[in-house]
Amino acid sequence: MMHLVTLSPLNQVRLLWVGLLIVKLTLPTAISAQKDPWAEDKAFLQELFKQSLADGKAYPWLRDLCHGAGHRLSGSIGAEKAVRWAKAVLDTCGLDTVWLQPVMVPRWERGAPEIVEILGTPKRKSLRLPALALGGSVGTGGKAVVGEVVEVRSWEALDSLGKQGVSGKVVFYNRPMECRHFNTFEAYGGAVDQRVFGPSRAAKYGAIAVLVRSMGLALDDYPHTGTLRYDSAYALIPAAAISTNAAERLSALLREEGNARVSITLNCRTLPDVLSYNVIGEIRGSLTPDKILLVGGHLDSWDVGHGAHDDGAGCVQSMEVLYRLRKLGYRPRHTLRCVLFMNEENGLRGGLTYAAAAEENEEVHLFALESDAGGFTPRGFSFEADPEIIDYYFEQILHFEELLRPFGLMFWRGGSGADISPLRGQKGLLAGLRPDSQRYFDFHHTTADVFEAVHPRELQLGSASMAALIYLIDKYGL
């Protein structure tokens, strides 16, 4: 027999208030969950970042690459080791396919250490300057090139000197990177033309050699190498970069004494092209496998330091994007492809070869993301595309910024990456990971760019940020 309990009027009121309080506390949460269309994605991204920071692979992979292969200039033994290492690691990541794409690359060797000296006078001793031959420079034929120095800070200054002021002399380009730029890549872009085009512009007026102030904002004793481009219309003259401190010393000496003579000995040489490879791995898409989302960096580096920031960091971050999404059990709609390009530093052969093969195979790249700005704390992504469609793409991509802002990431227009730039003709969206750039040019192309200069947490945040963007674009498209 059921017994009914009759509540007093006071207890009935109390029970009513308790019920209303429960509804008041739970209803907003339920409504909020219903109203938030990103709830599932927010949870996924949180887990992605947690796993990357707690059990990231990018940092130990970078250690193995840097200490196992060392520096990796195209055509070198280090580059060969890096190709073998990268394929072996990708083979362990549970991808659907991993392969090597043949690329013919230039082979330039530095040879014995450079000797650049300001010659002494009866009043002072000779002074050795920290220097590195520019990539692709001719050597000095086993003997020193000696000449009077003429300093210039602009193309106009060089042109005004003409043959009369330059012929038979060593041109010293001393235009510093502009420190007032917040974006250090803008400062780099405003000065690097001296290094790239300076030797042939000086040879046009009869110069016998070139010295270039290193492309760095700090005053230190690390010379920065980097590629040059000879113009075949003029003589090929030897060219070297000197450290920023050395540039300051040489400039001060010219002001104090009015002239100076330098001796330059370079032992570099260019050999015939050799075979190398892009290293590629992919996860096939479940719905639209014919459309590709690419993530990558360049496997080659200059022949000084480890090439850790430039661009070992970008390679291991890109590898972890596919590894991490696979580890999380994510099944992509599009094909996700990791490409480790060869020969970005002195030829871009890897990027050009990849783009040509993509066209031949009628592969469609909806999106390509490159990391080639160092392994520092990520600040966001920059985007570029064909002028006809960039407005549309950027409007679509901005929908994802809200989800990535809690991780300190922002979106802006302008630039992507050198290796993926040949894909621009496909009219997809191109992007670049943009870490904090303030210290990047302290390491760029120098012996200081070693594994120990990379912070593990910053590196892992970069790989997680890239994976997050790839996840969102794959799930929602453009």
Image (tube, rainbow, N blue to C red):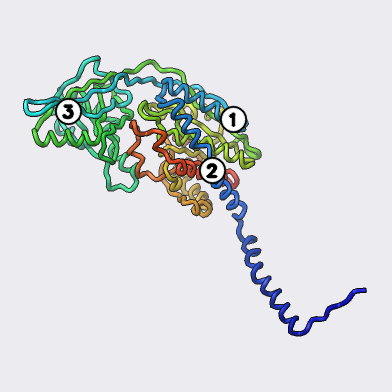
Q: What separation in Å lies between label 3 and label 2 (alpha carbons)?
A: 49 Å
Of mark 3 and mark 2, the one earlier in the sequence is 2
Q: Position of residue 121 (x, y in %)?
A: 9, 26
Mark toward the start of the polypeptide (1 vs 3) = 1
What's the amino acid at mark 3? Answer: Leu
Outermost right residue = 1
The residue nearer to you, when weighing 54 against 235, is 54
- Where disc 3 sits, the SS reads strand
Please say whether residue 166 is visible from this viewpoint: no
Estimate how packed mark 3 is, as few (under 14), some (14 to 19) or many (20 or more) residues with alpha carbons within 10 Å: some
In the image, residue 287 above or below residue 339: below
- Classify residue 327 by image quadrant: top right
User: How far across and how far down the image is residue 35, in percent?
Assistant: 62, 61
Residue farthest to the bottom? 9
Front residue of this view, candidates 450 and 406: 450
Residue closer to the observer: 362 or 91:
91
What residue does disc 2 label?
A: 52
The structure residue drawn at horizontal position 73% and vertical position 77%, both measured from the top left corner, is 15
Task: Give the labeled residue for mark 1.
Answer: 92
What residue is disc 3 on? 127
Q: Amino acid at mark 2?
A: Ser
Dot 1 and dot 3 residues touching (CB under 8 Å): no
In space, the residues marked 1 and 2 are separated at their CA atoms by: 17 Å
- Left or right: residue 384 versus residue 32 is left
- Residue found at x 32% / y 23%: 136
Q: Could you tell me the amino acid type at mark 1?
A: Thr
Q: Tell me the SS state at disc 1.
A: loop
